[in-house]
Image: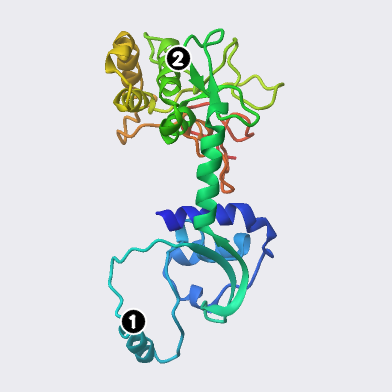
Amino acid sequence: PCARVASDAVVNATHRLAAPNQSVPEWVYALPEPARSEKIADVRRFGSPNVFDQFRAHVSVGWASDESSVASAVAQLAYEPGATFRADVVAVGSTGAHGTVLRGRDIARFNLTDDAELCAAHTAARAHETWREPSGELRFPYLVPSGPYSQLWDWDAVFLGVATLAHGSRPYLEGSMANFFAAVNRSTGSVTGCLTASLPTVCSSDPSARDALVHAKPVLIQGAWLASAAPGGDPGRFERHAPAMEALLAFWDRPPRRDPATGLRVWHDQLESGADNGVLSRCPSARSSCWSGSPGRPRRS
């Protein structure tokens, strides 16, 4: 999974630099469907047959037309299935005709150890910049992702609060969850995915926008538990919010948020799911011309 996440990030950041409509490797045409068509589409759009769902982490150790020679060479590597390792360096390099990486042809190299230390130091020095004291409609301390955003966001607060617990974020994680629980409509279980100190709630970095994230992700109760379990936490502080938690759980257990045909929960739109920056997005939200307004069901043109 880690290799897949890294691959997706690289493709998202660089695919626009690839020459479009490249030649499809001959081996792709020998694949069964639907893999063949999917890989052909990926080559034409991203320049590679092995991206996103078609990505398979592997190491090409060599190539030969004689399969027995390859098998013999691999056997001599004493490879252990399931072996794990930690990479200290990631490199972008040139490949040969058969997918093997060419020695001495690195285009760029990145030292992960150095980057990790820089990231940790930066987080320690700047974590407090995401803390906010009670303000307006937000009656408890809370977290913001910073950058262009000043709102309190659902899973941003959970991830940010947990990741920076060592730097003092616990009261702000606790307060963030308390702010969401205080905003829950206890009759319907509804609460927007971001909250602001003033009304109406606007979930956008664009000051002219007037839309809101339809509903918070179902992570708020987990966030409260994580804040309570951290040093200095107390589950008793959330007892007053028990009715709001029950309303949230009930919200995700009835239509339209639980699909009666499959029993699965349904996002209102892609923005609500948090997977809103993918290059493959076709109809992510009400801002899209294809959107019908029905939870989880974009209009097809």
Q: Which residue: 49% across, 23% down?
A: 193
- Using residue 21 as the reference point, say whether residue 222 is left or right of it: left
Q: Secondary structure at mark 1?
A: loop
Q: Residues within 10 Å of mark 1 (few under 14, many from 20)?
A: few
Q: Would residue 114 appear left or right of 263 to someone viewing this image? A: right
Residue 297 pos. (x, y %) = 48, 33
Of the numbered discs in the image, which one, if any, rests on residue 77?
Answer: 1
List the residue tagged with mark 2: 179
Q: Is disc 2 surrounded by few (<14), some (14 to 19) or many (20+) residues within 10 Å?
A: many
Tell me which amino acid carries mark 2.
Asn
Between 234 and 179, the one lying in front of the other is 234
Q: Which mark is residue 63?
A: none
Q: CA distance from mark 2 to mark 1?
A: 56 Å
**What x and y, as percent, mark residue 218?**
38, 27
Badge 2 vs badge 1, beta-carbon distance below 8 Å: no
Taking the spot 28% from the left edge, 18% from the top edge, the residue there is: 235
Residue 94: x and y in percent read: 60, 74
80 lies above or below 69: above
